[in-house]
Image (cartoon, rainbow, N blue to C red):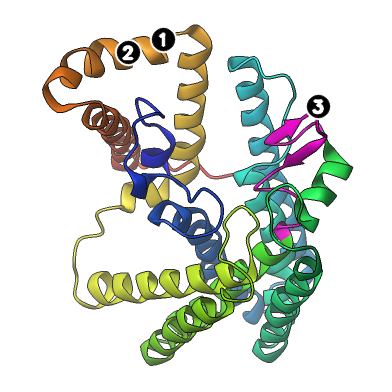
């Protein structure tokens, strides 16, 4: 996410590092659902065992609600900072951390209290129900049910809003959060199989989800902004394959966990890097740094795309160094 969110020049970004314009799925469109899928895996590996060990439901519910609320609050604070830095006309309450927090608050109790069969029933109800809600009105941008509902409830406080036409949308809005909960629950099921060492079922589920997502896309297009049901299955299939591959390489074959420093300080990397970007942008330094350190001398030699990518890679490397330094000292920021 740090790589795709921070190019030097948004006008010159290689296609795989951009979101699909509307329908479709690029590698960048896999990042956020992978986040939510891993939330589900962490529920299966961390919270469910505590419930099985006899932890009081009231204690678990309080911990879940508290953690989810803190994640949402951090997202709201980051957007408050962005509102100031970019001098935006309206504050935007929806965002990545807000969706993660909401989905966690809903999915974690379901994972604790429902048997696997009922969890699958919830997943099916969310995906089929969302399809039933959206399909009558179609999936056109601004005119689908999700966009129209979010606009009616929250305009102008959206990612995109045109006061002249009254049209708006938010890729992390309220309505599309419903199928996102299914993404987390699919991560719960994958995490349970991982916990039991059932790699065969992980592989079968990954292939089945990819096939189902691809087939469903003929009726309900794969669309990240709407978080369509086909998109949920398609991205969950790739996430399950990635989880299986990393389990086999790292847990079973002993390959080094190269991304561990980011993993143990994910919140620090995400919130810290966003704060840095907003601060530099607010001070007017972001563009100047890119122009003088990268574009000014690299563009005549390599064209405009290379310096834009080099800037993004440098930003990731900077934060990799920060979280590596924190990990070496045992500093792990948790909320």
Q: Is residue 136 above or below residue 203?
A: above
Do the residues bearing badges 2 and 3 touch, measured as CB atoms within 8 Å?
no
Secondary structure of the residue carrying numbered label 2 = helix
The quadrant in which residue 12 appears is: top left
Query: Where the C terminus falls, by quadrant?
Result: top right
Q: Compare residues 90 and 190 and report the one nearer the observer.
A: 90
The segment highlighted magenta reads: 156-177
At x 50%, y 30%, the residue is 274
Image check: 181 left or right of 266? right
Do the residues bearing badges 1 and 2 touch, measured as CB atoms within 8 Å?
yes
Q: Residues within 10 Å of mark 1 (few under 14, many from 20)?
A: few
Secondary structure of the residue carrying numbered label 3 = loop
Q: Is residue 186 above or below residue 72?
A: below
At x 43%, y 90%, the residue is 201
Residue linked to disc 2: 289
2 or 3: tag closer to the N-terminus = 3
At x 41%, y 50%, the residue is 264
Secondary structure of the residue carrying numbered label 1 = loop
* Residue sitting farthest toward the left: 301
Q: Residues within 10 Å of mark 3 (few under 14, many from 20)?
A: few
Is 166 in the magenta?
yes
Majority secondary structure of magenta residues: loop
Do the residues bearing badges 1 and 3 touch, measured as CB atoms within 8 Å?
no
Q: Compare residues 49 and 165 and report the one nearer the observer.
A: 165
Residue linked to disc 1: 285
The quadrant in which residue 40 appears is: bottom right
Residue 164 has which mark? Answer: 3
């Amino acid at each position: 996410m740090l790589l795709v969110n921070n190019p030097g020049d948004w006008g010159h970004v290689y296609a795989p590092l951009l979101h699909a314009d509307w329908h479709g799925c690029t590698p960048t469109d896999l990042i956020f659902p992978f986040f939510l899928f891993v939330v589900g895996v962490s529920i299966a590996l961390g919270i469910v065992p505590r419930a099985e060990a006899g932890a009081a439901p009231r204690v678990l519910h309080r911990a879940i609600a508290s953690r989810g609320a803190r994640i949402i609050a951090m997202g709201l604070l980051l957007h408050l900072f962005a509102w100031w830095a970019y001098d935006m006309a309206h504050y935007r309450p929806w965002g990545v951390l807000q969706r993660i927090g909401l989905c966690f608050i809903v999915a974690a109790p379901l994972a604790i209290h429902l048997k696997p069969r009922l969890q699958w029933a919830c997943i099916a109800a969310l995906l089929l129900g969302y399809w039933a809600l959206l399909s009558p009105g179609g999936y056109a941008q601004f005119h689908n049910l999700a966009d129209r509902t979010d606009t009616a409830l929250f305009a102008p406080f959206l990612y995109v809003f045109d006061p002249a036409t009254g049209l708006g949308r938010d890729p992390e809005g309220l309505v599309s959060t419903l199928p996102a909960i299914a993404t987390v629950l699919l991560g719960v099921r994958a995490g349970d199989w991982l916990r039991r060492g059932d790699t065969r079922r992980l592989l079968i589920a990954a292939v089945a989800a990819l096939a189902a997502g691809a087939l469903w896309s003929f009726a309900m297009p794969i669309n990240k902004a709407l978080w369509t049901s086909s998109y949920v299955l398609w991205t969950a299939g790739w996430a399950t394959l990635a989880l299986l591959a990393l389990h086999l390489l790292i847990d079973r074959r002993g390959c080094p966990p190269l991304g561990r420093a980011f993993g143990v300080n994910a919140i620090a990397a995400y919130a810290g890097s966003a704060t840095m970007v907003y601060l530099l942008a607010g001070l007017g330094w972001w563009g100047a740094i890119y122009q003088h350190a990268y574009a000014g001398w690299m563009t005549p030699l390599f064209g405009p795309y290379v310096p834009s990518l080099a800037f993004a890679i440098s930003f990731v490397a900077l934060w990799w160094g920060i979280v590596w330094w924190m990990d070496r000292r045992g500093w792990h920021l948790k909320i």
